[in-house]
Amino acid sequence: MHPSLSTTASPAAAAFDESDLVRLLTPDGRRVEHPDAAWSGSEDDLLALHRDMVLTRRIDTEGYALQRHGELGLWPPSLGQEAVQVGTARALRPHDMAFPTYRDHGVTWVRGVPPERLLGLYRGSEQGGWDPAEHGVALPAIIIGAQTLHAAGYAMGVLMDEAVGHDDAAKDAAVAVYLGDGATSQGDTLEALSWAASFTLPVVFVIENNQYAISTPTNRPGGVPLVRRADGFGIPGVRVDGNDVLACRAVMETALQRARDGRGPTLIEAVTFRRGAHTTSDDPTRYRESAEEEYWEARDPIARVRALLDATGSHAEALAALDAEADALGEHLRAACRAVPDPDLADLFDRMYVESTPELQEQREAVLAWRALGDEEAAR
Ligand SMILES: Cc1ncc(C[n+]2csc(CCOP(=O)(O)OP(=O)(O)O)c2C)c(N)n1
């Protein structure tokens, strides 16, 4: 059997060590305390986090279904990763900047990106998707690890602008970068960590350890917990329950504040699980067993917040309204997907640089002339 198809190295339920995870909400929805993290939000805050996760899941379900209906070229599911994405992104302030990957639908949702803009990207119709400056979130990186260098470079800029260390929420800024467990093996990531540590950059590395880099289990590159990579760079590392939205929010708040205060980077390993396929082109039954999926299903990030909400009072009205909101969002996304305009070929060249180059303009003219020829032939 090909090594990547072996399931023996996967984190079997019994072998998985949860003892060092920062956790504030148990898998069955009970609040617990932790010496290194605190969450003191209100009932409304809890409902808001729950809403973000439910709507993120709805965006994901719709994206998946739209791909299956042939409306999208590809979709990378985020099922099961809602807590780490929503919890950490909700700790960001408006002028902080996030650098997500292709799977971070919860991050873009929290930053206010209209989810239909994601559909344009995966339909192959969008050259970009949104203005990163407007939403405080970059376009998703598909090249593994590339966003870590973008984030380190941006954080370098924040430092040069002297936008840290004033103890002033209006001035100080931080940067968050999201990466998968597989991306920790990429040279770009190691370089970004090295720069971040060397220059005390205001950046938080959020590793979404969803256990697999496509079919390669996390424990394949040596079995050392990813959080321990932080030691090598001399920066703090935190291992958090990535399916616990409260803990994710709490550890991220601390890490971002550290960055804004000018005390440098933090590495967070959020231990979670990708419950769906890697992308719609993948079949996870070829490399992992259903027992592992069931183990993680029982740790569902939304269900555990829901259990806490059910224990703290009656929220029937808010939850019914949320169901209706999710249905309306689904309907909106389906209609918006079909209404995405076809891409304009010339646009491809115009969007390359702020100021185009003569070479690009030449290429643009050549392509447009070639297309006009095709149109003429078709009309004959
Ligand atoms: C530089 C580069 N190498 C390889 C790929 C192909 N590729 C796409 S996704 C992926 C696995 C990434 O795994 P991980 O970082 O754990 O993120 P996840 O997909 O699990 O969220 C790979 C190798 C790529 N996109 N970019």
Image: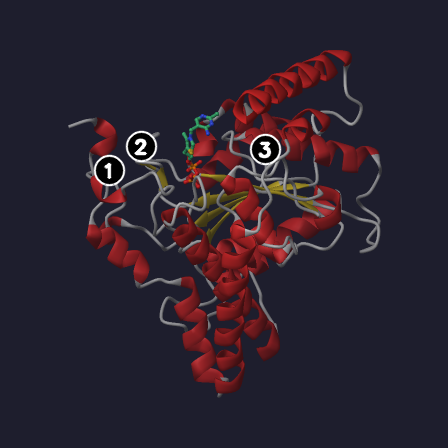
Disc 2 secondary structure class: loop
Circle nearer the N terminus (2, 1):
1
Picture residue at 48% right of the left edge, 66% below the top: 54
Indicate the position of residue 320 as horizontal and vertical percent values.
49, 81
Q: Quadrant of the N terminus?
A: top left
Mark 1 lies on residue? 9
Between disc 2 and disc 3, the foreground one is 3
Q: Nearer the viewer, residue 255 or 324?
A: 324
Mark 2 lies on residue? 220
Q: Nearer the viewer, residue 139 or 91?
A: 139
Display colour scheme: secondary structure
Q: Is residue 372 above or below residue 91?
A: above
Disc 3 secondary structure class: helix
Q: Nearer the viewer, residue 231 or 24?
A: 24
Indicate the position of residue 316 as horizontal and vertical percent values.
48, 86
Q: Amino acid at mark 3?
A: Thr
Mark 1: is the Cβ under 8 angstroms from ligand 1?
A: no
Q: Amino acid at mark 1?
A: Ala
Q: Residue furthest bottom?
A: 314
Q: Could one spot residue 83 in this view of the protein? A: no
Q: Amino acid at mark 2?
A: Arg
The reply to whether callout 2 and callout 1 are in contact (CB within 8 Å) is yes
Q: Nearer the viewer, residue 134 or 165?
A: 134
Q: Quadrant of ligand 1?
A: top left
Give the CA distance from mark 2 to mark 3: 22 Å
Circle nearer the N terminus (2, 3):
3
On the picture, is 233 further left or further right than 5? right
The reply to whether callout 2 and callout 3 are in contact (CB within 8 Å) is no
Mark 3 lies on residue? 148
Circle nearer the N terminus (1, 3):
1
